[in-house]
Image (cartoon, rainbow, N blue to C red):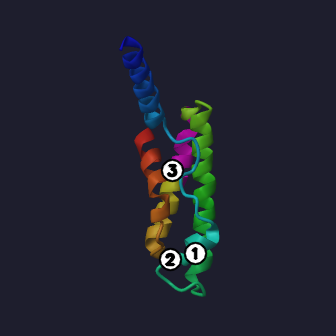
Amino acid sequence: MRKLLLLMAIVFLSGSSLIAQSPTSIQCTLTIDQISEAQPFDVDHPKQEETREIAENLIAEITIVYDLVNQGNTSNLSDHTATIEALVNQATVLGMNYSMFQADLNYIESLN
């Protein structure tokens, strides 16, 4: 009985520690084309070029933030989080759907 309880405790603790760990890479797995297709305007719309650029920059900046966090270097995050905030503002003004980045944005916001 003790062995069973010990085993259950180990499984519980290891499982809960996996859940508590922060993500180590970008959560948005969509391609740039898929992000373009998820926009409220047509793929041929003039805003698509700017949408693609914002999405590419968001992916790059979010990836850098995750890399810095994984390296334990949180002192250099402020420049990247400011850039991400500016990109989100651009996306909002453009009318871009950036909801596919929400999990990443929530994680980055929790770092502050």
Q: Which mark is residue 36?
A: 1
Q: Which residue is mark 3?
A: 82
| Foreground tag (1 vs 3) | 1
Compared to 32, does 110 lie above or below? above
| Foreground tag (3 vs 2) | 2
Q: Are marks 1 and 3 in contact (CB under 8 Å)?
A: no
- Where residue 3 appears, x then y in whole percent? 42, 14
Give the residue drawn at x 36%, y 18%. Answer: 5
Ranked by sequence position, the earlier of labels 3 and 2 is 2
100 lies left or right of 44: left
Residue type pointed to by label 2 = Gln
Compared to 19, does 107 lie above or below? below
- Where residue 13 appears, x then y in whole percent? 42, 25
Give the residue drawn at x 60%, y 57%. Answer: 59
Q: Which residue is mark 2?
A: 39
CA distance separating discs 3 and 2: 24 Å
Image quadrant of residue 57?
A: bottom right
Give the residue drawn at x 56%, y 70%. Answer: 35
41 lies left or right of 55: left
Say which quadrant the C terminus sits in: top left
Give the residue drawn at x 54%, y 86%. Answer: 42
Compared to 19, does 29 lie above or below? below
Q: Are marks 2 and 1 in contact (CB under 8 Å)?
A: yes
Frontmost residue, 103 versus 1: 1
Decide whether residue 41 is among the magenta residues. Answer: no
Residue type pointed to by label 1 = Ser
- Where residue 2 appears, x then y in whole percent? 37, 12
